[in-house]
Image (tube, rainbow, N blue to C red):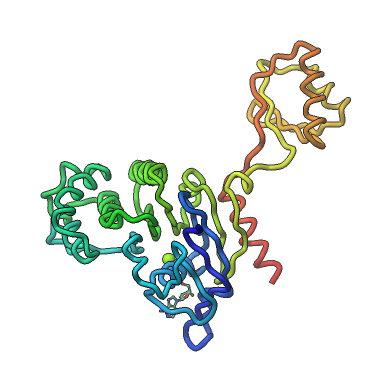
Amino acid sequence: MLAIETTELTKYYAKGRIKALDHFSLRVEPGKIFSLLGPNGAGKTTLIKLLLGIVYPTGGSAKILNQPISDHHTHEQIGYLAENHRFPEFLNARQVLYYYGKIAGVQTVTLKQRIPDLLKLVKLGDWAETKIRKFSKGMLQRLGIAQALINNPRLLFLDEPTDGIDPVGRREVRDLLLSLRDQGKTIFLNSHLLSEVERVSDEIAILKDGKLLRQGRVQDFISVKDQYQVKLSANEKHFREICQRLAIRLQEQNGAYLVSVNDRKHLNQLIDEMRSHQILIHAIIPRKISLEDYFIEVVEDREEGQ
Ligand SMILES: Nc1ncnc2c1ncn2[C@@H]1O[C@H](COP(=O)(O)OP(=O)(O)O)[C@@H](O)[C@H]1O
Ligand SMILES: [Mg+2]
């Protein structure tokens, strides 16, 4: 069963002048952290709103947890943290979870047990009775995630959960998302904060102007084929000679070397030669680019192609 499946899902605003989402087809596996990336205005929030039945599609169809999005019974198994959410400031943390739990249809006895557990989970256990007007942005985001978990959902939609939070707060959110994933929940994340996404996501999709540009595993996007960083114990003059002999392109990079080989066999030839010259290898690391660099490449490419 897929957690989310959209088929040619389309949403136009302003009588078709704004194509917020344009024939968008996506498949999200369960038990994963999936991130939708895209510049502001790409259509990320529109997708979540369509999936949750907050706005209606102009065309196409979608399923969540194997049910069509028109079937609102599925909502019992879904948690949602809206972008730029605001809870009433006169409530304390416990009350926020209680009221949102009631709205979500959770029974009072269940709430009484679950609220302390959730507050502990998001590291707000000592703040249950504090009015949220005193909370930092990071605390409010964590409370927001607890709110999204109040009905113990299988599928969680989080729209920009780390926006406006400092690095420590982000790390806390990140650790929380990983632990939720490890409990078997599916997490669908909207974000424009790429370094966050790179650390946490199993899979990503890149959206621009309502269109899907890429979908796949983060690892596959950020590794560069046939380039390796080689670390040696000292500046070995033999190493340069070997590379020259094997026609391996070599660049120096902050005290290490970057080699470009033809294929794996070529790389292993290099290793054999190095070992036979008693060169001590510290590490050979496949080269990676940051998701940010990749994203900019993909998004700008398309602009030039248009
Ligand atoms: N209710 C609306 N009416 C008209 N245009 C809208 C509405 N909601 C969103 N849009 C437009 O649709 C596009 C996608 O917006 P949105 O889904 O919020 O993008 P993102 O979340 O990726 O920043 C933008 O051009 C936005 O201005
Ligand atoms: Mg948005």
Q: Where is residue 88 in the image (x, y as percent from the top left)?
A: 18, 64
Task: Please state if 18 lies on the left or on the right of 185 as rendered.
Answer: right
Q: Where is residue 121 in the image (x, y as percent from the top left)?
A: 27, 43
Nearest the eye: 122 or 300 = 122
Q: Using the rendered image of the protein, determine whether residue 270 is visible from the camera's viewpoint.
A: yes
Nearest the eye: 269 or 299 = 269
Q: Using the rendered image of the protein, determine whether residue 167 is visible from the camera's viewpoint.
A: no
Instruction: Give the quadrant of ligand 1.
Output: bottom left
State the residue at coordinates (19%, 50%). Answer: 115
Is 276 drawn above or below residue 252 in the view shown? Answer: above
Nearest the eye: 112 or 43 = 112
Q: Where is residue 130 in the image (x, y as percent from the top left)?
A: 12, 50
Quadrant position of residue 7: bottom right
Specify the farthest residue to the top.
Answer: 278
Q: How many marks?
A: 0
Specify the farthest residue to the bottom.
Answer: 15
Is 239 drawn above or below residue 41 in the view shown? Answer: above
State the residue at coordinates (70%, 33%). Answer: 228
State the residue at coordinates (68%, 31%). Answer: 229
Is 255 drawn above or below residue 201 in the view shown? Answer: above
Nearest the eye: 81 or 86 = 81
Tell me the quadrant of the picture where the C terminus can be found.
bottom right
Q: Where is residue 51 in the image (x, y as percent from the top left)?
A: 43, 69
Task: Please state if 128 lies on the left or on the right of 7 as rendered.
Answer: left
